[in-house]
Amino acid sequence: MEVGLTHFLVLSAILFSLGIFGIATRKNAIMVLMSLELIMNSANINFVVFSRFGNFQIEGQVFALFVMILAAAEVAIALAIVLNIYQNFRHVNVDEIKDLKG
Amino acid sequence: MLQKPPNQNKKIKKNKIMETLSIVFYLFAFIVVVSAMGVVFSRKLMYSAFSLLFTFFGVAGIYAILNADFLAVLQIMIYVGGILVLIVFGVMLTSRVTDVDIITGGTGRTIYISSGIFATLMLILLIFMYTTVNWGTIPITEYKDTTLDLIGLTLLTKYVLTFLIAAILLLIAFIGAAFIARKGN
């Protein structure tokens, strides 16, 4: 069977569902960040696939480039926040950090 | 005539390329799916981080199959060289005792099962959508030599403003990250 558009889309769907599952089940903030990276990668695969098989020339790849830039910025900020949380709470469990709760 | 006509020869060659391509695709897809499952299901945080390495490499291979050579290189440079190193540092800095393996600590069983059902439903819905919708695309088989010059041209003409804004955003984000992560904040 020839590899076509659908194969890549199904692959990215599997990656996306795994990322959603990881975000929903894990308590550790860094684990949530890793699952977020999985989701971003699946979105990126979709961009590149439609750039090759769709009628968009190169713009899908350019957009995937911007997604990568945003992912780098997001991870830098998020890890800084996680380090700060660790200094204050001595753990990074996202469900136990509720000091802002009224 | 012993020799085949050149047209048929070309077609056989093309078929062979497509066959190799699908083998390579299934190999990389297998790597991506298995290592992503390793990221999500492994109990130790460090194992997840190392699994993520293989996921990123697999996705880079998928980009290479899709004629996005520049993006494949960038994926390895940015994700493996930058983001993964940051994540590994984050794992090491937020563990109390380095000798003890950090258990990622799952939530309760109900949340585990319900989010599993939710993720599976989402997967089924997405696959149903992807396989039934007619995307109206034309199959492309020929490969360009490189997409680098085209990407550079597009970035510096049509999307030059977006490019500059992304550069400034990255600068601001890194300054902000350094500021937030300072000790005694």
Image (tube, coloured by chain):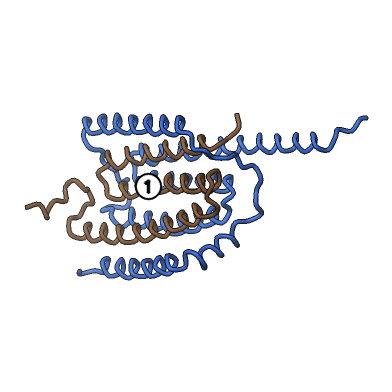
Chain colours: A brown, B blue
Query: Is B90 or A20 nearer to us in this picture?
Result: A20
Q: Is mark 1 on a helix, strand or loop?
A: helix
Q: In which quarter of the image is residue B118?
A: top left
Q: Which amino acid does label 1 sit on?
A: Met
Query: Is B75 or B109 nearer to us in this picture?
Result: B75
Residue B42 placement, left or right of A11: left
Q: Residue furthest left?
A: A102
Q: Disc 1 designates what residue?
A: B46
* Label 1 neighbour load within 10 Å: few <14, some 14-19, many 20+: many
Q: Quadrant of residue A4?
A: top right
Query: Is B29 or B131 nearer to us in this picture?
Result: B131
Q: Is residue A48 visible?
A: yes
Q: Which residue is drawn at 38% across and 58% down?
A: A70
Q: Mark 1 lies on which chain?
A: B
Residue B143 placement, left or right of B4: left
| Residue B164: percent from left, percent from top | 43, 69
| Residue B129: percent from left, percent from top | 41, 32
| A73 w.r.t. A48: above or below | below
| Residue B152: percent from left, percent from top | 55, 64
